[in-house]
Image (cartoon, rainbow, N blue to C red):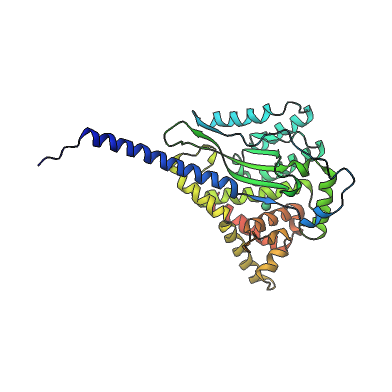
Amino acid sequence: MKKIIKPITITFLIALTISLIYFIGNRFYHTFEYGNNSYYSFYSAIEKTKEEKLPDNEEEKIYETIIETDMKYTDQSIPNKEWVIDYIEKEAKEQETKCNNDLSIIEEEITSTTKIYGVNLCELSEETANNIKDALKYIYEKYPFIKEYVTNISLINDGGTSSYIAAFKPSFTYMTSNTANRFPFVIKIQVFLNAAYYLNDKYFDLIIENASNTNHFPKSTTKTSLVVHEFGHVITYVLAIKNYNSINTILLPENNFSNYATTLKEYATSAFAKLIVEEAYNDYTQSNKKESKEEFRKNISGYANSNDGNGDIIYNETVAEAFHDYYLNESNAKPESLAIMNVINKYIERLV
Ligand SMILES: [Zn+2]
């Protein structure tokens, strides 16, 4: 007997398909939201410094930026990448109503050398902004493959001095589309400078002095080099994108979602950075004196031996600190840092 599909069955099937698409779309979306909160690394100060006495009335004063960093847009019609870039650039500029001309010029120079579209640093002192501009120029000339990945560099209000100094946040879902599955997404890759430190020079100087003296940061750390540390994360992350066959996420189509999710997971859990550190440790101990893995990390800096509170080593910090040390001290950096830089260069040669 011939099977007849009744109209009511068809209606049911269509409804089921639509709800499945929505379900999958939502699941993706929530995966990203979860990622926003956990998939980043930051550069923290040591607690000891915070207990130190500060000059009177410095302690009470709150240093904040006017910049808003958490705008996001859903149900957008997103024509192409150029439109997205334009949107990010305009949004960053429109927020800086009182930027003085010299600082505006520095920001424009940063955008032109790095292709970081949203730059919000105009409340910094001119000296700090200039130093950061020079450091970024140096990094992007030496590692041009990271160009066009970081979308924003900005001051941020995020928890005051009980929070981080600087942060790398690679997975902020900035826009979703008005399509059934919400793709393409726009993912911002961002570097943040906490206003509570970067706009409070006296307090920040004290932190840096204390943390350098106790080997928490590498030798000769500065306000600028703490930003350079974040670009150690950027380099690691972009290499992870290439290693796991993902793409630049400024416009993320559905067919790259799976590779992107893998990249994020391998980066966020420090699994990728661990590959780099382990290879560097093996190279180092084969040709140099024996030392434990912990000594290897600690010799870079205290922060290079960070753990996540559960006792798991944050290898992302080990790599970023090696990069930081190399930037500051070049061939005089710790041999352990140089061993990590050798492995990074091997990855660059293979993947870029
Ligand atoms: Zn870090």
Q: Quadrant of residue 200?
A: top right
Side of 270 relative to 154 (left or right): left
Return the residue found at the far right.
56
* Residue 256 image offset from top left, x and y in percent: 46, 44
Q: How many marks?
A: 0
Residue 58 shown left or right of residue 177 in the figure: right
> What residue lies at 41% left-to-right and 34% top-to-bottom?
180
Q: In the depicted view, which residue is nearer to us: 330 or 292?
A: 292
Please identify the quarter of the rendering in which residue 276 is found: bottom right
Quarter of the image with the N terminus is top left
> Which residue, as the protein is rendered here, is positioned at the far bottom?
290
Instruction: Determine if residue 161 is in view.
Output: yes
Q: From this view, report whether residue 188 is shown above or below residue 261.
A: above
Question: Quick check: 93 left or right of 255?
Answer: right
Q: Is residue 110 above or below residue 97?
A: below
Task: From the top left corner, tell me how far across and down residue 27 is, in percent.
Answer: 46, 44
Picture coordinates of residue 60, whole percent (x, y)? 83, 43
For the point 69% across and 62% down, which residue is it?
Answer: 305
Q: Is residue 80 visible from the viewing direction of this image?
A: no
Instruction: Between residue 201 and residue 338, name the one nearer to us.
Output: 201
